[in-house]
């Protein structure tokens, strides 16, 4: 039984895998996370044999790592430190790429083939571009929809805070609906235009894989031919763990 944890800026997304199948998935808010919350969630799963963490929040990584050590009696594996994502990374400075992006790239290319583009719509929106020979080429990063809405509310004197939801109309008839339509549909238009340009670069056979908490809004309004996999990162963590474990097993067999 494997516990995979994706620590992001908004949530800790956790998945419990049994024989390679995701049996349970749950989120814990990152900003308000306190030690003990994870233990409460997994107390009915005492047979967890390994934990793997993929994180972009170092402070939380240390907290969760210590908590898992107490719960399981073993130190969890950290993606990027203990487990290296088995994908060629062609970033100019490879260490600058978030491990979650590499995990997504490996998972998507393994599951769907390449070339492809991963669009992850969360706190930030990221594009990750994978070549036909399954190498990570790089990508784009820009603010997610929720951040954009928060920024307008915080950085202006008169504009109100607006909750992210489905806009009712293209043209807003009041300030809140105008902001909502502008942010959501503007983000969709930006995403669609960038995707078209990247597809010209990769070729007509390029696929689009969508993930992240707000990806359904983008798919709904863009009309893009996109495969949505909300559990792409968790699945990727499991695939990396399985791949590295298998390689280590073969190495032990060859070198007894």
Image (spheres, grey):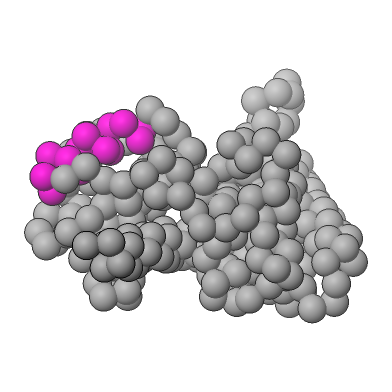
* Magenta region: 60-73
Relative to 241, does residue 151 appear above or below in the rendering? Answer: above
Horizontal and vertical percent position of residue 177: 73, 49
Whether residue 61 is in magenta: the answer is: yes
Foreground pick, 111 / 44: 111
In the rendered view, does 142 fall on the left or right side of 123? right
Relative to 177, does residue 237 appear above or below in the rendering? Answer: below
Q: Quadrant of residue 217?
A: bottom right
Q: Quadrant of residue 224?
A: bottom right
Horizontal and vertical percent position of residue 72: 13, 48
Quadrant of image for the C terminus: bottom left
Q: Is residue 203 visible?
A: yes
Horizontal and vertical percent position of residue 167: 70, 58
In the rendered view, does 146 fall on the left or right side of 152? left
Q: Is residue 145 visible?
A: no
Residue at 52%, 66% (x, y): give it: 107
Residue at 32%, 51% (x, y): give it: 52
Foreground pick, 138 / 252: 252
Residue at 71%, 32% (x, y): give it: 152
Relative to 179, does residue 47 appear above or below in the rendering? Answer: below
């Amino acid at each position: 039984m494997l516990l995979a944890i994706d620590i992001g800026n908004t949530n800790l997304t956790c998945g419990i895998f049994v024989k390679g199948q995701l049996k349970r998935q749950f989120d814990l808010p990152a900003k308000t996370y306190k030690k003990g919350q994870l233990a409460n969630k997994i107390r009915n799963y005492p047979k967890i044999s390994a934990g793997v963490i993929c994180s972009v929040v170092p402070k939380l990584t240390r907290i969760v790592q210590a908590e898992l050590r107490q719960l399981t009696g073993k130190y969890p594996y950290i993606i990027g430190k203990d487990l290296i994502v088995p994908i060629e990374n062609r970033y100019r400075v490879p260490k600058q790429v978030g491990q979650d992006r590499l995990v997504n790239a490996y998972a998507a290319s393994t599951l769907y083939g390449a070339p492809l583009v991963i669009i992850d719509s969360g706190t930030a929106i990221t594009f990750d571009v994978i070549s036909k020979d399954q190498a990570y080429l790089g990508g784009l990063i820009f603010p997610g929809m929720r951040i954009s809405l928060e920024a307008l509310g915080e950085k202006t004197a008169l504009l109100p805070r607006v909750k992210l939801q489905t806009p009712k109309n293209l043209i807003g008839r009041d300030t809140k609906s105008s902001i909502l339509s502008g942010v959501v549909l503007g983000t969709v238009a930006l995403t669609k235009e960038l995707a078209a340009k990247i597809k010209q670069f990769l070729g007509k056979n390029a696929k689009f894989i969508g993930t992240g908490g707000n990806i359904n809004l983008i798919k709904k309004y863009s009309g893009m031919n996109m495969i949505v996999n909300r559990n792409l990162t968790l699945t990727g963590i499991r695939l990396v763990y399985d791949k590295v474990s298998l390689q280590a097993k073969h190495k032990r067999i060859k070198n007894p």
